[in-house]
Amino acid sequence: MTARPLTTDELLEFASATAGFMPEDEGELLFEVAARALPHGPGLEVGTWCGKSAIILGAAARVAGSVVFTVDHHRGSEENQPGWEWHDPTLVDPEFDRIDTLPHFRKAIARAGLEEEVIGVVGRAPTVAAHWRTPLSLLFIDGGHADEHVINDYEGFARWVAAGAVLVFHDIFEHPEDGGQAPWRVYQRALVSGDWELVTHRGSMRVLRRIGGDAGDPVR
Ligand code: SAH
Ligand code: MG
């Protein structure tokens, strides 16, 4: 635990130094969008990993006087498993011979002093979504990147994004040579639904806003 609360700049630096998958400039956009959205209600992230983006969202939640729930089974996605591109053997729990990012996440949030703002929810996203009942000011979809997972995350949680509130997608790659296509397909589906307007984007991040309200006042 930290002796004094870290400043926003220190928190963002701490996030930079935390293991994960969030380029600096996209993290800055996530912070700006979240700081504007979160005063209007809680936020939810799908895909915690070791807490890198959760710290960014937590820093914004602190500024906004709000909270962020972050959902993960902490067993890693397909691409994190042994033999795949994004495997890190230091994250394997030897007792079960499975990835376990939960202790790393917990330590990161404690070190950041964000235990009041960031609430870890440990479980499969569709199970959590099936029981979720709370309108959201911000939804950040950054969980499993296979079609099944992105579709589940969108169908399970996007319905809880309030009018005027924001839906942020990560890892949106239009061209297959840049990355997996499932998030792109779901993002396209969101756009043609007529429920969302594109507010801003940076790198592989896309910020949508639910049409029909002014909650969140996201950056343009
Ligand atoms: N936001 C993180 C990166 C998330 S990586 C960062 O900034 O670094 C994607 C995460 O989604 C992994 O931790 C994986 O365990 C989780 N995940 C994948 N499929 C899931 C599912 N069906 N339910 C819950 N979590 C899932
Ligand atoms: Mg990502």
Image (cartoon, rainbow, N blue to C red):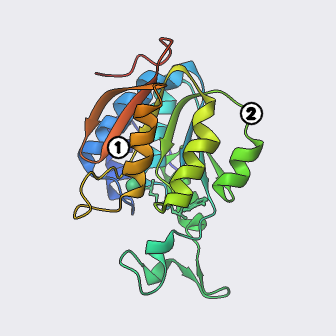
List x then y, in percent, for residue 215: 50, 15
Disc 2 target residue: 133
Q: Residue 113, relative to residue 93: is it above or below? A: above
Disc 1 target residue: 12
Front in this rendered view, residue 138 or 68: 138
Q: Quadrant of residue 136?
A: top right
Mark 1 residue element: helix
The quadrant the C terminus occupies is top left
Amino acid identity at mark 1: Leu
Mark 2 residue element: loop
Label total for image = 2
List x then y, in percent, for residue 84: 40, 81
List x then y, in percent, for residue 17: 33, 58
Q: Residue furthest right?
A: 131
Q: Residues within 10 Å of mark 2 (few under 14, many from 20)?
A: few
Amino acid identity at mark 2: Arg
Horizontally, residue 177 falls left or right of residue 16, namely: left
Front in this rendered view, residue 156 or 94: 156
